[in-house]
Amino acid sequence: MIKLALFAGDGIGVEVATEAVNVLKFLFDLNSIRYEIEEDLVGGASYDEYKKPITEKALKLAKDADAVIFGAVGGYKWESLPIELRPEKALLTLRYDLGLYVNLRPAKVYSELIDASPLKKDIVNGTDMIIIRELTGGIYFGQPRGIFNLGDGQRKGVNTLTYTTKEITRIAKTAFEIAEKRRKKVLSVDKANVLESTELWREVVADTAKNYPDVELSNMYVDNCSMQLIRQPKSFDIILAPNMFGDILSDEASMIAGSIGMLPSASLNGKKGMYEPIHGSAPDIAGQNKANPIAAILSAAMMLRYSFDMGSLAERIENAVTGVIRKGYRTPDIYSDLGIGETKLIGTKEMGAAIIAELKLKG
């Protein structure tokens, strides 16, 4: 019996998570896989109901589940709340309390969607990378933090960037192990010239690399990496990054692929995982059937692969996504009447249905 926790969250998170669950249910039923999906509120929806972004009940649901499906949280209406009550606190709490220290963010350019990328075709064609982001350390979790009164009308905002040898070693090992199954290249990103915490990052990653002699390790400062991602994205394979740098670089990589609506993610602690699209709640299009559910559906594929060792089912979803793209189905974020072949503008629900139809065709 597979036990899943579903936190659709806010805005378009509800719409895209629904389509991901529909795809999973179809495959589970088709293959006689027993499953149980229990849903609860998180984020702004939880605050509206319980005055907190995540409840102990929801957190227990996540801890008891084999894996978590997450939509998106946040929106304009909650931005004025104290930081500890904002919707995003639910996401950080889940990551920390579940110990999800590995964040995998693939960025792949589909040849049929090259026109959706703002970069030239010859620059982006062939791009296929994974950004491996450390997720439970760094500046998002370091102490002390807060806004402090200094007197005389002055205040000071403080965030602390810290990393331990253990935190760096375990995320580096993950990067090298994944690299061994790909092109055997790891680029470690830091700002070691000015930040001691990332000077330690570089040293520990280099020490860990000695256990993986077949993998080529290189280093790059984060500002240079952000430039090179635009200049030559297909030269990258595995990018290993501290929490904040990985957050920023993966959003940059999303535009190389043409849309943030195409990029899935997996947050892992061993087999335990939380799976979510990297995009936000997009309140400006919420409820309008305009959101792209592909990132959420590909996140479900990652769940099958990493939490349940169902690689063949994951590949079926990935192939179905490729199939609908080749047939010209497009949500607004990836729609263009340029390029090869006829394109068809469709909505969130229609894209989910098209992917399930593609799965049915393959038997």
Image: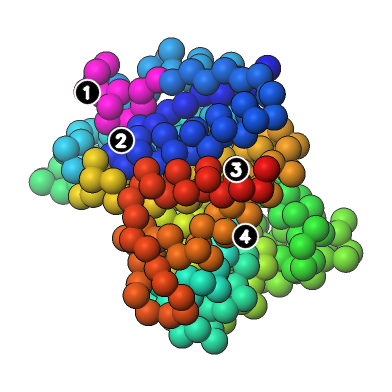
Q: Position of residue 61 (x, y in %)?
A: 51, 17
In this rendered view, identify the residue nearer to me: 237 or 118: 118
Does the magenta run of residues contain 357? no
Q: Is residue 74 left or right of residue 359?
A: left
Choose the circle earlier in sequence order: 2 or 4: 2
Q: Which mark is residue 130?
A: 4
In the image, which is nearer the foreground, mark 2 or mark 4?
A: 2
Which residue appears at 67% of the width and 68% of the height?
A: 237
Which residue appears at 39% of the width and 52% of the height?
A: 292
Amino acid bearing label 4: Ile
| Magenta span: chief secondary structure | helix
The residue identified by callout 3 is 360
Q: Can residue 350 be seen in the rendering of this structure?
A: yes
Choose the circle earlier in sequence order: 3 or 4: 4
Amino acid bearing label 3: Lys
Q: Which mark is residue 48?
A: 1
| Spatial separation of the CA atoms under disc 3 and disc 2 | 30 Å
| Spatial separation of the CA atoms under disc 1 and disc 3 | 39 Å
User: What range is drawn magenta here?
Assistant: 40-50
Mark 2: which secondary structure?
loop
Q: Position of residue 102 (x, y in %)?
A: 62, 44
| Spatial separation of the CA atoms under disc 1 and disc 2 | 11 Å
Choose the circle earlier in sequence order: 4 or 1: 1
